Structures are given as structure tokens and as C-alpha cells.
Amino acid sequence: MTTPVVLVAGLHPTARTATVHRLLAAHPGAVAVHHDLREVSSGRVERTVRDVSGVLDSAEVLLAHGCVTCTVREDLLPELIRRAGNASLLIVDLWDSVEPRTVAEALDTEEASEVLRLTCVATALHTEHLPVDIARGERLSETGQGASGDRRYLAEVLARQVEYATALVLHGGDEEDHELSRALLAHLAPATPVFAAEPPYVTGPALRTEVLAERVDPATAVLPCDARDGEITTVVWHRLRPLHPARLFEAIDDLVTESVRSRGRFWLASRHERLLGWDAVAGGMAVEDAGPWLASLPEAAWDLVSPARRAAAALDWTDPLGDRVQHLVFIGPDLDRDRIHGLLDSCLLTPDETVAGSSAWARYDDPFAPLLDLEEIA
């Protein structure tokens, strides 16, 4: 018999603490474990264990290497396994800036699976702060919510906490804040259930981390559809011609500052065989090589990729392009759909450039190369 484990993430500590307390109150015998990571870079972490009545145990943990993964591997996982036999539910109260995917995958071990099952990844959100924070351009180190030297942006982490979660829990604010937050979440994570006063269901079957990853990875993510809810807009751009690398690079700044959040997969002419991931939030932009297009692989290799990857490719499949596609979504207040489409369309190859073929495209100057080639080397 395994003990259910729920991860509670969130940049807003008051919302996270309230969510943890509701879960403790709703599940007699539940225990919550929290690691204070303010000093993690120096190898010092404070661990607190509590139930609904208050703190049960507190200790300072010394780590050989100060990082979130080290904390999970060297202290959180052993602590959860030790307490599994006596707890009805184990709640991992994650530090503000921790992304739940890192922890979920670190807990996915053969040893842990014998006594633990991850049943829910909840992200707690303060409705007064969410609409502001998702558009903030500061780094975590500048806001005091990340360790010294943490170069991630606050909005970047918040977006990942929202999009990876299997449940979103709202706290604080007034009725207008709740309405705006629900509207925003309906665009950012339209398939994820949102809770307010009631805690999410957390004692069900085990979640599979590979399935959680497929929900957010560029090659397999089910992206939001075109939508408008009051002032909030989602604009989808879907095309079947490759993008010119230099023209797209020149347009990036305009594209990412037009919206609060944009993401998806795209086809760059100079990298004809590679699916690229687009990830932008609050004016910051990242691209990644997400692997080959299935159309570039021999059919015998398709059995080596996941069913979700094959299903995503099938939805985009056209002859003779295969699954090569432009599929980007942009989310923000009152977006100008025609402007975004026009800007991206201007970056596509012209008909003459298209008929020149991939051997000619490979000779284009590629301003994305320093970033993507560095990623491959790392």
C-alpha cells in the first residue's frame, strides 16, 4: 500500500501556506514537509515538518552540494519514505521559486515507488498578485524569492508552475481579482481545474511523470485555442511554410513584447530536420531544440518515440511536409491578431525561397545558432 504525495508549489507563500493548511485539515493524519531554501547555495537548508496542529519537527540540513535537486535527493525523499508508513497523506510544501517538475521527476525512483505515489501537483496562486506577476520582468534574485545568483525570471517560473500543475488553487483578493485570475488561467492552462475554497482531490491513482512532461514539452503540448475573454486574448498562428532565420530573429523583440505569454513549436528553414520550441514570458525569450521532426526519421524509428509524440505529429501531418509546422500561441490583454499574424507571416520564406529547397536553406545565416548550438554542447 503506497502513501499519496501531493506537491504544492507557488511563488505566493500566503496562498501556498493556506492551501497546505486546507489539505492538512481535510485529511486527518496528513503531514507536510517544507524546506526553507534561502541559504541553499551555501549548503544550508532548514526542514520543517508539521500537521494540522502545528510543527512536529524542525532541523537544519547540511548538503554537500547546495541545489534544489540535492535537497530532494539527500533529504526530502528519505524524509518522505521514513514518514510514509504513519501518514495518510504526505504534502510537499515547495519553496517559492521551486518548479514542481524538478521535484516530481526527482521523486520518481524505484525505491520511492514502493511506498509513495505522486497523486497531485497543485500550484497555489494569490489572485491579487497573479495578473501582475505574470507580466513582471524582474529576475528572482532581484525580488528576493530566489537564491543568490538565480538568473531565472519571476514570470518565467510562475508560468511553469501554472502550466505543469494538475490543479490550480486560488487564494486571497476580492471577487474582481478572482474573476480576472480565472479568466487569465483559462488562457494559460485551459484544461487544468481551478479550485478556490475547497482543496483539490489528492488521494487518487499515481501520476506518471513522463505524461506530466508531455503536457508541457514543445513537441507534445496541447496548446490553447484562439479565444477572447474580456480583455484577455489568445491568438494562434498556424502555418505550413518554414521561417527565414534572419527575418524571424529581427522580429523577435516585437513579437515577445506584444504579449504576456507565448509558446509553441516552430520550423526554421536553416534547421529543416529539427523541431524548435518557443518559450516567452514577460518580454523574456528562450528557444530550444526539442528533437527531430518525425518526418525526418525513418519509419522504423517511430516505435522509439512516445505515443503522445506520435499523436501530436499525426494531428499536424500533411503531405509532403509531414509534421513540420508553425504552431505558436500568444496570450495577453487586447492583442492585435492581425498585427501578430502579419509580423510572423512576413518572416516566412517567400515562394521563390521555398522552391529553392532545404539544401539552399541550410546555407542561410542563422542568428539562432549561438544559442541552439551552445545548448547542444551543454
Image (spheres, helix red, strand yellow):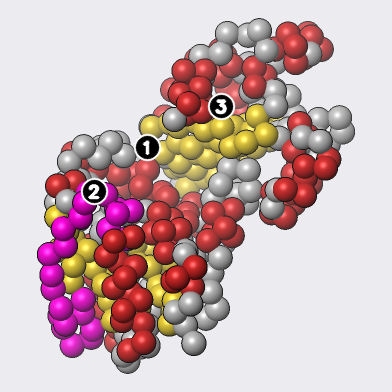
Q: Find out whether residue 52 is within the magenta segment.
A: yes
Query: What range is drawn magenta here?
Result: 49-72
Q: Is residue 9 left or right of residue 193?
A: left
What is the C-alpha distance between the residues marked 1 and 3? 19 Å
Relative to the observer, which residue lies in front, 19 or 103? 103
Secondary element under disc 1, as helix, strand or loop, is loop
Q: Amino acid at mark 1?
A: Ala
Q: Mark 1 = which residue?
A: 282
Q: Secondary structure at mark 2?
A: loop
| As drawn, 196 above or below 361 | below
Horizontally, is 328 left or right of 10 in the view? right
Q: Earlier in the sequence, mark 1 or mark 2?
A: 2
* Corner quadrant of residue 267: top right
Asked if residue 101 can be seen in this view, the reply is: yes
* Tag 1–tag 2 contact (CB < 8 Å): no
User: Between marks 2 and 3, how big is the CA–CA gap?
Assistant: 48 Å
Q: Earlier in the sequence, mark 1 or mark 3?
A: 1
Q: What is the crowding at mark 1: few (fewer than 14 residues within 10 Å), some, or many (at least 20)?
A: many
* Picture residue at 67% right of the left edge, 34% below the top: 292
Mark sitting on residue 339: 3
Q: In the rendering, at what x and y percent does residue 20 appear?
A: 29, 75
Mark closer to the observer (2, 3): 2
Q: State the residue position of label 2.
A: 65
